């Protein structure tokens, strides 16, 4: 039996491991055979265990994959518990124990474990019975006799990692020539002090260079196409873009056809950057701009981005500085300053969040430049596989509202879409995305894509960075400050409630440095085989539908996130027109047939009646409200109807993040509805800064709104009564019958807001001293649905019908199970489409 087992292990592969002075090299062929039958010619026999460790597989596929899953699990567990990577010798010993404990019914596998830890590079061989040996070089599989001859001839102590790569490739190539079970290509991976980069495919690259341009080919095409007059000094990756640095920017800026024709050839985004050598010092640039900017434009400030060589000019009348403005020529100013020009509207209330982001990015400009280059290297690397398999893994937000998260996976790429928390959950297993379902190491992720800033879509993202994710995060420009604001507030809320936050302020700042912002409608490569386009979702500021173009047009997947398919005061209706779309994943927050929201006129009339009745009785109206989106909309409604005399004039107090969120809205008018955008851009009037509003900056300012004889309107966060200043107001308002709690946003199951809405007459909450307080609820409670940033049932169905081109399949998420089920059933019935409502921890094959 032993000989037979040994034959099975040796039959049909060649793997090589070499310890170099500065790292580890693992190398393997790509052929999987069963006897004399070639079962697969594209097998990945090198597997990443963690960012510093990997292994090679020889033997039975199922047994070997089981070992990989076990080692990944324990490696991740060690990293979380100890806050350090697992040592390589511990990983090898663990593998040995697994084999030894199962020696009666052995795993049919032979494993090489290698990596780089605090003690340097280490390489181990573990056989099927658990014997473990540390090696300088080793080879396994049926081609190992041939490979050993090459290794013993060529190995020397102190080999560099590049020399070791060459030796490993030579050894496996020799086995391919002489061994029938070895062939079809070579995978090779290196591990050094910087970790485990992508697995490189030697023979596959040469095969694919005919079809997919490698990074070297792209650079060669650019160099051949750019005229000498352009004076391009260097070409670098800048995340998903290719940056051309020039000492004479005028040539490329005035000859747009040069860049356009180049983009048509390489099918990649190109940006023109000024060479660092011609960029004038910032103080000198400020003086030049003070002279160049027309006085009527009213220059307010400048923001320098040293990573990209751009300067943003903030002016009160930005339309006087646009590209077609007669008095301000962008090319002339770029030539004078050596910096590319961006124009922004100066806000009446500066955003502290945006100021912090700008300062952080400037402080870490060098690090950010390196990160962007590394991201580009990963995006534009040669493809490692010519297979096209597309799968979705549901990690959260299915059959529930909260912790939205899913993984889009191909043989080439892994992209995490949203990374939220469930604010109403009482256990970690129910609160966070089930990343354990996919046995995923964070280094394997190519990208994270964020649809919008709410915590149920971004609340776990800082924890992802805390535990080692170092890749790019893609979102719209306003989503970055919005999610930054909300995540930092969540830390404060947790501390106030006596809970330990799952991440720190440092982790939130790390997200700033890893985020790449994208405008609506721009096609962007985010991995070698996935392109992303963001489109308006109409939900909150910067919210996006995410369109993924996968492979060479093999499949197009649209993720709705939260959408509003109806125009509001703040935003245009969600976009519905895409070049191609085979599969749609759509939310179902209001997925039942009876989930019909009143018209805008009806809900505003109901709001006026509810507020006036309470104020007339001498009561307070407490509106628990999300700071982002709903608060700004309600503020505009109150301002409008108080000015018209339809709402009784009374003090309006805001507290929480509302004032800061409003400042961020004003900073990005291009993402707002057309009428509101024009008002902000073309006037000095800030619609979010009314004379009726008083913002409470500190707890000391609550005295007036909490006075018993003070009828008023209070807007405070959070919208679900789950922490924030609203709880202090709730304690004050709830016991009195003359007062009212008015909900204008969705209340998730398990939250205090939902319990109050469902009729609970008593609430318990933690006080400032840490003691539990009981609050009697005698006040009126009312909910108005028409202000929701979610589509109602009719709007969801209309969106599916309107979406172009016609879909093949619809998946339903982000709703209570009965709502998701109902919406899927009605889509099938009405539109004759395949429609399904997955649950958490399902794998769905798209293609």
Image: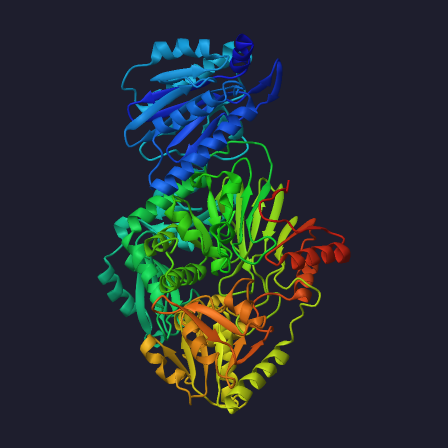
In the rendered view, tell whether residue 643 sits above or below residue 843. below
Q: Nearer the viewer, residue 9 or 496?
A: 496
Give x and y (percent) for residue 179: 52, 11
Front residue of 340 and 584: 584
The x and y percentages for residue 377 are 41, 39
Q: Residue at x 63, y 52 (%)?
A: 584
**Residue 666 percent across, percent down from the top left:** 43, 71
Rendered location of residue 592, percent (x, y): 68, 63
Q: What residue is shown at x 45% (from left), y 31% (from top)? A: 71
Vertical arrangement, residue 226 with respect to residue 482, above or below: above
Residue 834 appears anywhere in the view: yes
Residue 280's quadrant in the figure? bottom left
Q: Is residue 688 visible?
A: no
Q: Residue at x 58, y 80 (%)?
A: 604
- Image quadrant for the N terminus? top right
Image quarter (top left, top right, bottom left or bottom right) of the C terminus? top right
| Total labels drawn | 0
The colour scheme of the drawn protein is: rainbow
Up/down of 688 relative to 252, above or below: below
Residue 109 left/right relative to 809: left
């Amino acid at each position: 039996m032993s000989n037979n087992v040994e034959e099975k292990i040796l039959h049909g592969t060649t793997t090589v491991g070499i310890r170099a002075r500065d790292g580890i090299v693992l190398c393997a062929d790509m052929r999987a055979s069963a006897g004399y039958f070639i079962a697969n010619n594209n097998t990945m026999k090198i597997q990443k265990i963690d960012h510093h460790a990997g292994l090679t597989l020889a033997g039975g596929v199922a047994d070997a994959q089981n070992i990989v899953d076990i080692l990944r699990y324990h490696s991740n567990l060690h990293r979380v518990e100890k806050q350090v990577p697992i040592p390589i010798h511990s990983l090898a010993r663990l593998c040995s124990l697994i084999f030894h404990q199962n020696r009666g019914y052995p795993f049919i596998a032979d494993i090489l474990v290698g990596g780089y830890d605090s003690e340097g590079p280490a390489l181990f061989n573990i056989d099927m019975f658990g014997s473990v040996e540390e090696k300088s070089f080793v080879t396994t599989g049926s081609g190992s006799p041939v490979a050993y001859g090459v290794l013993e001839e060529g190995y020397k102590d102190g080999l560099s990692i590049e020399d070791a790569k060459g030796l490993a490739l030579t050894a496996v190539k020799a086995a391919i020539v002489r061994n029938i079970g070895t062939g079809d290509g070579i995978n090779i991976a290196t591990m050094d002090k910087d970790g485990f980069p992508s697995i490189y495919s030697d023979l596959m690259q040469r095969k694919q260079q005919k079809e997919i341009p490698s990074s070297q080919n792209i650079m060669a095409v650019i160099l051949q196409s750019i005229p000498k007059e352009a004076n391009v000094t260097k070409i670098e990756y800048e995340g998903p873009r290719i940056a051309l640095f020039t000492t004479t920017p005028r040539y490329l800026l005035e000859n747009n056809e040069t860049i356009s024709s180049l983009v048509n050839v390489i099918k990649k985004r190109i940006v023109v950057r000024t060479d660092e050598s011609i960029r004038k010092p910032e103080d000198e640039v400020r003086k030049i701009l003070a002279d160049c900017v027309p006085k009527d434009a009213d220059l307010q400030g400048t923001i320098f981005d040293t990573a990209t060589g751009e300067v943003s000019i903030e002016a009160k009348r930005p339309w006087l500085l646009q590209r077609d403005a007669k008095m301000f020529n962008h090319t002339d100013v770029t030539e004078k300053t050596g910096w590319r020009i961006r124009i922004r509207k100066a806000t009446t209330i500066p955003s502290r969040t945006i100021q912090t982001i700008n300062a952080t990015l400037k402080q870490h400009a060098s690090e950010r430049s390196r990160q962007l280059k590394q991201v580009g290297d990963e995006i534009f690397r040669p493809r490692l596989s010519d297979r096209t398999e597309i799968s979705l893994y549901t990690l959260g937000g299915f059959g529930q509202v909260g912790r939205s998260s899913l993984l889009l996976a191909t043989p080439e790429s892994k992209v995490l879409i949203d990374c939220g928390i469930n604010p109403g959950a009482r256990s970690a297993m129910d609160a966070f995305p089930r990343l354990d379902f996919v046995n995923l190491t964070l280094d394997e992720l190519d990208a994270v894509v964020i649809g919008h800033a709410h915590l149920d879509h971004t609340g776990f993202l800082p924890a992802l960075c805390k535990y080692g994710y170092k890749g790019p995060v893609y979102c719209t420009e306003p989503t970055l400050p919005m999610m930054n604001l909300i995540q930092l507030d969540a830390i404060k809320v947790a501390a106030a409630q006596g809970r330990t936050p799952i991440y720190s302020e440092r982790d939130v700042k790390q997200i700033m440095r890893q985020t790449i912002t994208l405008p609506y409608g721009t096609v962007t490569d985010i991995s070698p085989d996935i392109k992303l386009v963001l489109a308006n979702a109409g939900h909150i500021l910067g919210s996006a539908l995410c369109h993924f173009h996968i492979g060479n047009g093999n499949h197009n997947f649209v993720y709705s996130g939260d959408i509003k398919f109806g125009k509001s005061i703040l935003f245009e209706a969600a976009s519905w027109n895409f070049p191609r779309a085979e599969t749609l994943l759509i939310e179902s927050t209001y997925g039942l047939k009876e989930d019909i929201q009143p018209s805008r006129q009806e809900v505003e009339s109901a709001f006026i009646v509810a507020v006036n009745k309470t104020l007339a009785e001498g009561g307070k109206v407490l509106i628990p409200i999300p700071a982002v989106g709903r608060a700004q909309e309600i503020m505009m409604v109150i301002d409008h109807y108080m000015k018209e005399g339809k709402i009784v004039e009374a003090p309006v107090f805001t507290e929480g993040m509302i004032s800061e969120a409003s400042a961020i809205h004003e900073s990005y008018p291009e993402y707002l509805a057309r009428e509101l955008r024009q008002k902000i851009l073309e006037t000095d009037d800030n619609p979010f800064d009314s004379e009726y509003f008083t913002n409470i900056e500190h707890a000391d300012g609550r005295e007036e709104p909490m006075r018993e004889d003070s009828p008023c309107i209070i807007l405070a966060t959070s919208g679900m009564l789950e922490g924030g200043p609203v709880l202090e107001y709730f304690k004050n308002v709830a016991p009195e019958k003359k007062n009212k709690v008015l909900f204008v946003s969705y209340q998730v199951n398990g939250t205090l807001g939902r319990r109050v809405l469902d009729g609970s007459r008593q609430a318990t909450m933690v006080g400032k001293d840490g003691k539990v307080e009981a609050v009697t609820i005698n006040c009126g409670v009312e909910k108005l649905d028409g202000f929701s940033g979610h589509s109602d049932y009719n709007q969801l169905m209309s969106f599916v019908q309107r979406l172009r081109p016609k879909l093949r399949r619809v998946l339903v998420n982000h709703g209570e199970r009965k709502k998701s089920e109902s919406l899927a059933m009605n889509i099938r019935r009405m539109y004759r489409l395949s429609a399904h409502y997955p649950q958490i921890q399902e794998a769905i094959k798209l293609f």
